Image (cartoon, rainbow, N blue to C red):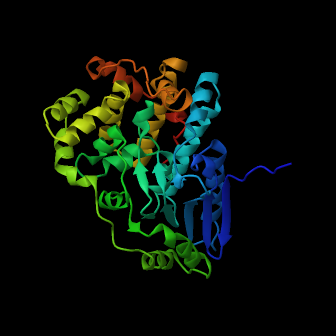
Amino acid sequence: MRSEQVLVKAEKRCNVGVITLNRPNALNALSLSMIRDVTASLLEWRDDAEVVAVVLKGATQEGKGVAFCAGGDIRFFYQAALDGDPRLEDFFTEEYTLNHLIHTYPKLTVALMDGIVMGGGMGLSQGAAIRVVTERSKLAMPETNIGLFPDVGGGYFLSRCEGRIGEYLALTGQVAGAGDAIALGLADFFVPSGGLAALVETLCDQPMESGAQVHASVVTHTQPMPSVQWTAQREAIDLHFAGDDMRAIFDSLQGDSSDWAAATLATLRKRSPLMMAVTLEQVRRARTMDLADDLRMERDIVRHSFHLRPGVASETVEGIRALSVDKDHAPRWNPARIEDVKREDVEAYFASPWPAHAHPLRMLD
């Protein structure tokens, strides 16, 4: 009888804790049990005086794509929403709590962001003190593609990007490679993928006295930042994505005759008009929030994403159906046009379903 696969490997090597997401056949997409295992290890090592730093990385498998973490398990979201499975609520509460833990962790954390780093993978890595990218890195918050919004603290870290990059990334789900990620402040260092194993060995094969020594060791393995790609469009992004609402952004892009504007419009037209409006509001509210308040807001929004319109009426359930279940790539958004999105429908996503004293993330500070 085959033993059950361990989806999170945690080991203490000398003075460094190493956490490996070990679900490579699913691009290390997060399950609830994985979130719990990562949290348990971080809490254990937080109070272990021998541990001076923690490394987060993803496992790879021959023949599969390379990923640090491709996000949450969206097929689980779909089935849980239809079944009324209470674990859906636990998933987001515990995932956001883990995101906060990483951002506020008292010891040095190093995220090795090799391959796909999307959604929940960004939630795990953006709070790390050192974020390492490679030539294979593909960073994105593509949630609007499934009728969701960039959660896991996405409002917080995207809104901290310069200019209107946060709105652009949140609405389009644009992928950033290593050079763009570093230029945008979403990564810190570049290390070729072939050098990651040597980096881990350097950190773990002899005792490290402090987080500062770990930091210095990482720096010795880095190489100059690769060239940037699409961030050359910064001026256009700041112009068009400064619009007051989604209709203004569409109108601005439509007035631009460039190929880039046309491609951007084509991307946006595939997204849920309602959830784009919710996403724009999220990023702009988050710009003036601290992390804990942003995560509480996102917990409210994600609750509404599945329950304000329950079951198949949910934009998120419909988006997952079209992308990952039926795979017809023809979501039936409601409303279908950005012109038909009502302000009161957007604001409903920001009304907390819980009083402050009973909020599931009330303990975050």
Q: Residue at x 51, y 56 (%)?
A: 102
Is 353 left, or right, of 21 in this rendering?
left
Q: Quadrant of residue 168?
A: top left
User: Vertical placement of 248 versus 294: above or below?
Assistant: above
Please state which of residues 139 and 128 is positioned toward the viewer in this rendering. 139
Image spot of residue 104 (x, y percent): 48, 57
User: Vertical placement of 121 versus 76: above or below?
Assistant: below
Can you see residue 174? yes
Is 143 left, or right, of 53 in this rendering?
left
Image spot of residue 126 (x, y percent): 44, 55
Is 198 left, or right, of 262 in this rendering?
right
Q: Residue at x 29, y 39 (%)?
A: 284
Q: Residue furthest right?
A: 1
Image spot of residue 243 (x, y percent): 19, 35
Q: Residue at x 61, y 66 (%)?
A: 18
Please state which of residues 249 and 63 is positioned toward the viewer in this rendering. 63
Is 351 left, or right, of 9 in this rendering?
left
Image spot of residue 182 (x, y percent): 34, 61
User: Vertical placement of 87 versus 152: above or below?
Assistant: above
Q: Residue furthest front?
A: 63
